[in-house]
Image: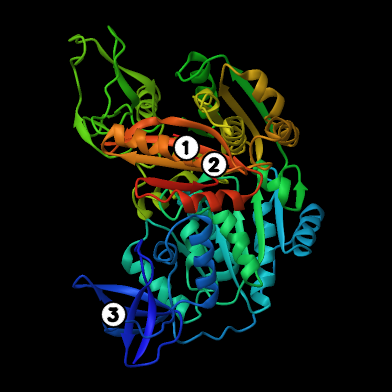
Amino acid sequence: MFYYKVILLGSSLEPLTYLSSKEIKIGFVVRVTLQNKERSGVIQKSALTPDFECQPIIEITDNFFTNTQLLLAEFISDYYCCSLGIALNVFVSHLTREPIFEKLIIAPPNLTKKQKKAFDFLNSHKYSLLFGDTGSGKSEIYISLICQTLNDGKNAIYLLPEIGLTPQLEFKLKTFFGDLVATWHSKLSKKRKDGILQNIYEGKIRVVLGARSALFLPLYSVGLIIVDEEHDESYKSNNAPRYNARDLSLMMGKKTDAKVVLGSATPNVTTIAKIPHFRLKGNFFESKKEVVYENAHNEISQSMLYEIKSTLEKKRQIIIFLPTRAHFKYIACKNCGAVIECPFCSVAMSLHKNLNALKCHYCNFTSKIVKVCSKCGSETMEAIRLGTAEVVDRLRELFPNNIIEKFDKDEITTDTKLNKILKSFKEREIDVLVGTQMLSKGHDYHNVGLSIIMGIDSLLAIPDFKAREKALSLAIQIAGRSGRKEEGRVFIQTKNQEFFTKFLQNYDEFIEEEKKIREGLFPPFKKLMRLLISHKTEQKAKDITNKTVEILKEFKDIEIVGHGKADIAKIANKYRYFVLIRSVGVKPLLTTAKFIKNNAIQIDMDPLSFS
């Protein structure tokens, strides 16, 4: 008999011992039972004959995880403080047969002198950052790197932060690489995903384009990993394991022979401080851009309507950005100011007119629209703060002869809807596209003559050390959608014009100023770890927090930045508290994490969210 330690996929348990009548290689996927339920597990290592009775391994499958995948899972488990079963569960296993890849001869696109310099720089570094302005031609450089990689007999992964970017880029990649390209993201059907995996197993797919999960596909011989829009927070997972795909791409490059290229028009301050970079300035096409400011926050003003009307008369398209979804962010009482909150989360309910309901964007609880205030009995309830759907409704009333559509996560629920709306916009069938952050991510449409930015001040006001960086980055990205070719205008509603005027066209200066502000306090100079304590009983959550703080005070190499109630004090009927700690390096934080393990404590290394 052979005994093995088996990692249960998706489980928080430590590896368990099982027996087998056959010898099994490390990394192979097996079927086992736990509490009379069948589970998938992975052979971690051989085990000595135990002094207790073991369950048998009931099936040895043809799937396995490579040594690289196992090593990366160990890193994720250690660094992001989760079990091996949780870490390994993000990967897709390989099949026993390894495909043979032919060397190809694919002609790359013609590059300008500037682009060729950038290409040579990226080629001379194993890890590098392409810091290129919006519209400077970064994608042509990426395609040239992919051509080189495929011609060398290796494969490539091209990561994007949002699925909204994939249709346009997929078309561009398929122009060069045809059916060697596959797109991977959460909105694909199971049938489509299974088909892509089969083609990967057979060696028919050589380039994978997709969101962060594409990094974990069973692609052999990866020679290049591109992380476009590397600054984007969508690369960070909000659920365990709370990994950042950008950082894992760099780690994968260390564990393999893959070159890693990060790219952005507004790179993360930490990235530019640590990774060699090439600065690519200017626009690939001749264009002129004018920025107009309005001292307002989030309203459909006469000045804005004038800009929209003028642009539509020129047969140019418009993009309008808001930081909120739904019709209004919340409903409040005009008499006493009380806000209608979710009964299970301490956040305001959002109004969705199409559902004729209020909905919580955290736990998805839905209720009827409230017409009477529960605190004072007043019937003077009003909707506060403009949202995407309300803007679409108002503009359709004012411009009935134009096509105005919504582009946010409420609207784009399937891959089909995504492709349809972007195709319509590309073919100029849509005049105005109103949306949230999804609009900011790299869309390249030459007929956009006006970008409107509303509600940007609400991002500046968030209690977050990266608030300025996030707001400026978003503004630059959205401004970059206008005037990709020919003239373009950017209309920004803000009461912080001085900040945007200074940095909107000078992100380099912003980076230097931001470094000085953060020195000795925040990344890239300090490492952060956030502990989130949640419990159905508030007193229990508070007690765990206080006890944790007392334990942390014993550690000399860490500093407690703050602790107390989370900004969102309750989600899904659980009360939430936090402790934020920092250190010069990562080791003291990881050492600390081992001493504070508790089912009520979630550990978030390198946190991006502080709510």
- Label 2 with label 1: CB-CB less than 8 Å: yes
Query: Where is 485 relative to 349, above or below?
Result: below
Q: Which percent across, then down, holds residue 499? A: 66, 22
Element carrying mark 1:
helix
- Label 3 with label 2: CB-CB less than 8 Å: no
Quarter assignment of residue 365: top left
- How many numbered marks appear? 3
Q: Which residue is mark 3?
A: 52
Q: Tell me the number on the disc at residue 336.
A: none
User: Which one is nearer the viewer's eye here, 526 or 448?
Assistant: 526
User: Which one is nearer the viewer's eye here, 505 or 563?
Assistant: 563
The residue that appears at 68% across and 33% down in the rendered structure is: 518
Residue type at numbered disc 2? Glu
Q: Which percent across, then down, holds residue 347? A: 33, 29
Q: Tell me the number on the disc at residue 550.
A: 1
The residue that appears at 34% across and 77% down in the rendered structure is: 17
Element carrying mark 3:
loop
Q: Residues within 10 Å of mark 1 (few under 14, many from 20)?
A: few
The residue that appears at 81% across and 56% down in the rendered structure is: 117
Colour style of the rendered protein structure = rainbow
Q: Which residue is mark 2?
A: 554
Evaluate whether residue 284 shows in this view: no
Left/right placement of residue 334 relative to residue 292 reads left
Evaluate whether residue 508 shows in this view: yes
Left/right placement of residue 375 relative to residue 479 reads left
- Which image quarter holds the C terminus? top left
Residue type at numbered disc 3? Phe
Point out the tag, 3 or 2, that comes first from the N-terminus: 3
Point out the tag, 1 or 3, that comes first from the N-terminus: 3
Query: Where is 479 relative to 41, above or below?
Result: above
Element carrying mark 2:
loop
User: Which one is nearer the viewer's eye here, 349 or 553?
Assistant: 553
